[in-house]
Amino acid sequence: MKDYRTEQLRNVVLLSHQGAGKTSLTESILFASGVLNRTGRVEDGNTVADFDPEEVERQMSLSASVVAVEWQGSKINILDTPGTFDFVGEIKQAIRVVDGALFLIDSVAGVEVGTELTWGYADERNLPRMVVINKMDRENASFERALDTLGKHFDAQFIPLLLPIGSQSSFAGVVDVVKMKAFMGAEGKAANVPANMADQVEEARMMVIEAAAENDDELIIKYLDGEELTDEEIIRGLQASLAGGTVVPVLCAAGLTGFGVRALADMIASYLPAPAESVVGRNPATEEDEELGADAAAPLTALVFKTTVDPYGRQSYFRVYSGALESDSRVLNVDVREEERIGQLATPRGGDQLPVARVVAGDIGVVTKLAHTDTGQTLCDRDHPVKLPGIEFPVPIFSVAVAPKTKADSAKMGTALSRLVEEDPTFEWHLEPSTRQTILSGMGDAHVDIACRRLKRKFGVEVLTAVPKVPYRETVTRQSEETYRHKKQTGGAGQFAQVSMRLEPVEPDTGFVYDWEVVGGSISGSFRPSIEKGIRSVLETGVLAGYPVVDIRVAVTDGKEHPVDSKDIAFQIAGREGFKQAFLRAGPVLLEPICEVTVTVPEEYMGDVLNDLNTRRGRVMGMDQQHGRSIVSATVPLAEMQRYSTSLRAITQGRGLYSMKIVSYEQVPSHLVDGVVAEAKQEEE
């Protein structure tokens, strides 16, 4: 692949609801550019963008794929993303490093849930965007109806730049309303505008001219004076309007057959902005912000936005924001203050890598075997350290307990889970001490299911999954006192210890407090740690239902010892058993984790969501409206939220989103305690 200057580059992310045809469109652009001699099909598992074995098997995109295409003197880096919310991390990574977005909507279904969600993510970065009404050759396809759904869902000025010639089985090509030319078939052969479309095309052209003139004083004066704008002036004006976010051009195509695809690729190259916008980084030494221009001659600054890991090493995908990254060089990872050796750089094209000598400002590349660098970290010149803002990933909301299938799996499981998190930061895993389970958390059931399959395929670790146990805790509600005597005589040296103690509750989050109130030497001070050790052995495993004991004060007040038979083990046992008896007399209760939950849904589902939260013992804390969507804040016990993602999807037809985090512990209602205790005893048996 030849060298390209920054102004010749285009970085565009494809966003849509699942099944709108992003991967097929990418395939058609590759074919039109001459890279492929025939287009692959998602159903056949032979597309460039979906190369992962799991993607091939499921016939859907599961990760963001970078596909470099050379087009009419430009290089377009297409980032093909998944269409389901479970893989939102991949979408966020791609959106972070592009300069424009191409939204695909189905010509039959119009705007769907995934379109709404990804539109919101693009809003977060104020990305310039274009919309493609795809699959114009489908039965019941309607450009006008799909265009109408855009206006109903989004507050934007939609301007058609490509109009379809026919639709459904008679879809024959497209009309470019700027060039006033028709482009027929998959080859995009130029032709005159069909006579029966003349009025429609003229009307669309007037909308385009008005939109182009709006943001350019020179053009608006010329337009108001009744002068004709040239094609070059219209393009310049549209570029400014698109970059400023005041206009969203609408295109059309049939991605699978390639009809309209060449005109669409021309418009990506012509209208979407080159990576010229400067970004702000921070100098870690001075803590001052620094503006970085997209200049290949400036000091290097690059962001690693995606990492893939396999048993043979890792691949790091990066975008250069300033300067240039050279093959066989050394750079600084400013986040961890470690030097990285850069080997052979490459331009990614799906699963293929095209070796290049350097990657300039604005371009995207991939490098293997970085030793210290993770997703979201910055590479820069050692003598010019600058840190770029990282990537904000959502908090995982769906958890499973994972257990190794065999002893061999057990030895490798921790390492494999850590590598999974390296690859996808929307995963988290930890060992939950209160339930003694390994918990893997992700964005949804499909996300976690595919992760478990990847553990087996990539790292040879097979795991069994289950619904996680709720990490309850135990504590007391009132003061109690107990005296316990341990006496054991077995012919030889015996065991003797007597301990009196007082238990009482303390403030939440205080933990365990151990006091020594023995006076007069009734127990030697040397046995003080022995009694504490005995008590602590119960704190981990609990008394009521096997959960950790928290927020409790134990004061040893008195006791007795024997000059011969008293020893460390005797006082450990007395402390342990005395604590258990005192605990059961001190009003023991179970505490359950309480989550702060934020649910975002279309307004029409608000009532159903509130009713559902009430059945889950939820307490609504507040309600708000934002961009036509309702936002509910509530606190809900974790025990009621274990599989909430499935329920919310059903209630809202997949249009609801939520986030949650554990914020506190509260007492379990008395009518539920017996069930938890019985379940714990049953598991123990």
Image (tube, rainbow, N blue to C red):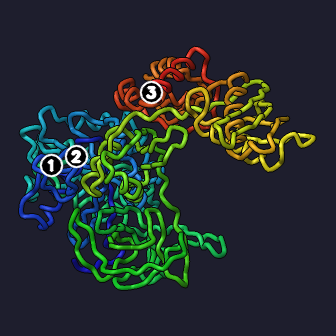
- Residue at 23% of width from left, 52% of height from top? 177
Q: Using the image as rendered, state which of residue 99 and residue 238 is in the foreground.
A: 99
User: Which kind of residue does numbered mark 1 sit on?
Assistant: Val
User: Which kind of residue does numbered mark 2 sit on?
Assistant: Met
User: Which kind of residue does numbered mark 3 sit on?
Assistant: Glu
Dots 3, 1 in contact, CB < 8 A: no
Q: Quadrant of residue 508?
A: top right
Q: Which mark is residue 685?
A: 3
The N terminus, quarter of image: bottom left
Total marks placed: 3
- Residue at 60% of width from left, 73% of height from top? 283
Above-or-below relation of 426 to 305:
above
- Who comes first in sequence, dot 3 or dot 1? 1
Dots 2, 1 in contact, CB < 8 A: yes
Q: Which mark is residue 60?
A: 2
Q: In what element is the residue under mark 1? A: helix
Give the residue furthest to the right. 520
Q: In what element is the residue under mark 3? A: loop
Q: Which mark is residue 42?
A: 1
Residue 38 in percent (x, y) is at 6, 59
- Who comes first in sequence, dot 2 or dot 3? 2
Residue 668 in percent (x, y) is at 60, 23
Find the distance from the CA under tag 2 to the CA under tag 1: 7 Å
Left or right, 57 with respect to 131, comes to left
Q: Using the image as rendered, state which of residue 356 and residue 405 is in the foreground.
A: 405
